[in-house]
Amino acid sequence: MSDNLFPFSDEHKMIRDAARDFARKEIAPIAAEFDESGEFPMTTIKKMGEMGFMGIEVPEAYGGAGMDTLSYVLALEEISKADAAHGVIMSVNNSLYCHGILKFGTEEQKKKFLTPVASGKAIGAYSLTEPMSGSDAGTMRSRAVRDGDFYVLNGRKSWVTSGPVADYIVVFTVTDPAKGSKGITAFIVEADSPGFSRGKKEPKLGIRASATSELLFENCRVPAANRLGEEGQGFKIAMTVLDVGRIGIASQALGIAEAAYEASVNYAREREAFGQKIGEFQGISFKIADMKTRIEASRLLIYQAALAKERSKATGERFTMQSAMAKLFASETAMFVTHAAVQIHGGMGYSKELPVERYFRDAKITEIYEGTNEIQRMVISRSELGLR
Ligand code: CAA
């Protein structure tokens, strides 16, 4: 989108350009290698921390960059365009971890648990899902029982992004089973807590350099001072934080789509068949038109959600629907665009010699995590129909 059409400030342009430059120079050259090995890209993630990308909206007093939501989505798009795995690590750190502590944490919790993560010195994660509780997050079974100045946690969590490497994790468990989703409480768990361990690492189709695992709690003692919010407030905290997380995933999806689109345009301009550039065939050119249109529509939905989130800092208004629409549309756009990109590239799109097949594999998860697109449709329609 042209800078003249959207009122970006100099600060927005500066962070977008810095992220673009960093992503091109430091991330794009290593993306294929880390996708292949599945190794966590600790060196580049630490550098992203030094550049302020791991806590973009966190005030400088707590180690962050003190910028706004539009800055966050612009930077995240650029990072994800080079590599979606770096994108999700950045998204989870910023939104699922930092935002929750910034919004619901005490002053002491912010100093102790936000500062190291927002500054990129440590890595944060968010743990809601369990083996038998995914979309229906209110049915989790892991337990936390108060014992003096501690809570004792037991249970198994799954699909935790950055689980294998996180230093701190916001974990949701049941404190009062009789109260359903109103009996869920959030805790900040330090990875060196007794009784905490990391379980099976997930072998994945895409975003392979981002580490995903189970987390195990066996009589894990967590200080009561680490409780985030009040007892029973956990489900609302989880949902509030996901509203922010989904804007991040939408931006990640946009970055993937952009990368696949640019590759496709270049290829369609150069590749020849039947005596002409393939872009001159309507079968290809119409694909390009549809790809571009959906990308720009995704971008506008993401900016709308980012602006709604920014406004909510003053008004407290929810932006649940804007965030769900951005994630729904951008993730389906990423699938549409990467699918078309493979087709436009033909055999080369299927080959590991080009990044196009990686974009295709990476896009799929954006329709699944942080709420499947079926859940996003439920959230949007419930809101429109006045059912919630
Ligand atoms: N903000 C604030 N409060 C919210 C809220 C939101 N976005 N959404 C719901 N609530 C509140 C409701 O107002 C309600 O409170 P009251 O009873 O006081 O009115 C309470 O929470 C319960 O809400 P619902 O009745 O709507 O709850 P539900 O059981 O019907 O479920 C759901 C709602 C939208 C389906 C929810 O369960 C959901 O989002 N599921 C998907 C979970 C998900 O996204 N998981 C991904 C985990 S993270 C991940 O993917 C891994 C990773 O590391 C990246």
Image (cartoon, rainbow, N blue to C red):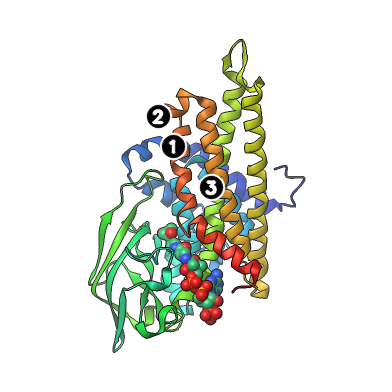
Closer to the camera in the image, 103 or 245: 245
Helix, strand or loop for disc 2: loop
Q: Secondary structure at mark 3?
A: helix
Q: Is residue 229 above or below residue 113?
A: below
Mark 2 vs 3: CB contact within 8 A? no
What residue does disc 1 label?
A: 358
- The quarter of the rendered structure image containing the C terminus is bottom right
Of pointers 3 and 1, the one earlier in the residue sequence:
3
Residue 352 tag number: 2
Measuring from the top left, give residue 49's x and y in whole percent. 46, 54
Query: Is label 1 in a helix, a strand or a loop?
Result: helix
**Which residue is located at x 31 percent, y 39 percent?**
37
Residue 126: percent from left, percent from top: 41, 64
Q: Are marks 2 and 1 in contact (CB under 8 Å)?
A: yes
- Residue tagged by mark 3? 253
Mark positioned earlier in the residue sequence (2 or 3): 3
